[in-house]
Image: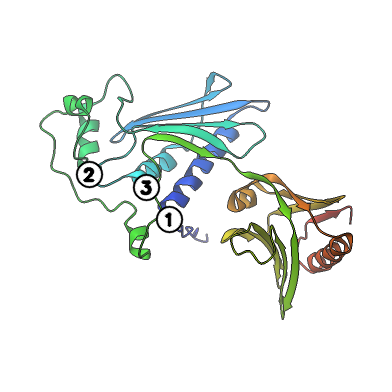
Amino acid sequence: MARKQKRRWRSRGDEGHALRMAIGDLARAAAEPGWSRLVVRRAQVGTYAVTTVSRDGHVISAEGMDEPFQRLRELSYRTDVGTWFTCELAFSAGTRGYTGRVDSTSRPFEHVPALAALAELATLPRAEPPAWLLDALPTAAPIGLPTTYGDRYDRWRDGDQPPPPPITGEVTYLPATTMTVRAFDKEQKHDQQYIYLGGQRDHPEAEFLMIQRYLQAHGLVRHGPRGGVGGVRSITLDGMVLRLELTPKAADLLETETTFEVHLDLPPETISELCVTLAAMLKSVAEPPELIGF
């Protein structure tokens, strides 16, 4: 069996976001259809953890969350400060977004096992542990062990570092649903072809969407390095709107909803050129997205 390759993340923040998205997918898989809101709460000290998943206020069973939550705690760790003890994430129907909160000081549950408190301060040491954590220890606070959580990210980059996942306060992710295009360009080089849709012409900071083809593969890139290969189920032309239906994986990479609308603020002749170019480009790819209204 082929060994699964681990993705190389750009920062602890990016990997932390991906872990929260994975937790949401696990909650969705565990819930019966027809739900409106899912809430996942993780409370953890050391290796002792309690995870509760609620579907519209009723607790349900869900599996597979221990590993992503454990990794998220490690990624969130800050030297001499610690990491969160509780993480609550809420997911609403009809969106890939989430809201939530993390807390690095409050007691996560009524009874904290002594060995869990010891393990917490040994593996994730903090300079000023909360009183309830010290009270739970079987002996005096242990000497901290070396930690390297997130170390590979710090080695990769010079200068300012993207912040790690938060350990206290709100966490929110609102996927993009629309963009407005005022610039269109295209380019073809050998086996590569690009269609560029920009929010503003000749403005390096403006939002953009690039549809690209390399040999028989197609993909999307949105506003920087976000994007990947494939994942476009269909593209619909509805008047002056291109409506893209994406797989959840593609939407998460682009940081959009699975339905993403591109409003075309372009002259009619430019829209016609865009559609002809797009249709011709996608005909030559393997498993092309369905084109509707072209």
- Gap between marks 3 and 2, in whole Å? 14 Å
How packed mark 1 is, by other alpha carbons closer than 10 Å (few <14, some 14-19, many 20 or more), is: many
Q: Mark 2 or mark 1, which has the lower sequence index?
A: 1
Labels 2 & 1 near each other (Cβ < 8 A): no
Viewer-nearest of discs 1 and 3: 1
Name the kind of residue labelled 1 in the image. Answer: Ser
Position of 218 with respect to 23 (left or right) is right
Q: Where does the image place residue 77, in percent across and percent down from the top left? A: 32, 44
* Corner quadrant of residue 104: top left
- Gap between marks 1 and 3, in whole Å? 10 Å
The residue positioned 39% from the left and 41% from the top of the image is 166
**In the figure, 91 relative to 7: above or below?**
above
Report the residue marked by disc 1: 11
Report the residue marked by disc 3: 75
Judged from the image, the secondary structure of the residue bearing numbered disc 2 is loop
The residue positioned 19% from the left and 40% from the top of the image is 127
Viewer-nearest of discs 3 and 2: 2
Position of 278 with respect to 229 (left or right) is right
- Marks counted in the figure total 3
**In the figure, 277 relative to 238: above or below?**
below
How packed mark 2 is, by other alpha carbons closer than 10 Å (few <14, some 14-19, many 20 or more), is: few
The residue positioned 61% from the left and 60% from the top of the image is 228
Q: Mark 1 or mark 3, which has the lower sequence index?
A: 1
Viewer-nearest residue: 202 or 170: 202
Name the kind of residue labelled 3 in the image. Answer: Leu
Q: Where does the image place residue 152, in percent across and percent down from the top left? A: 35, 60
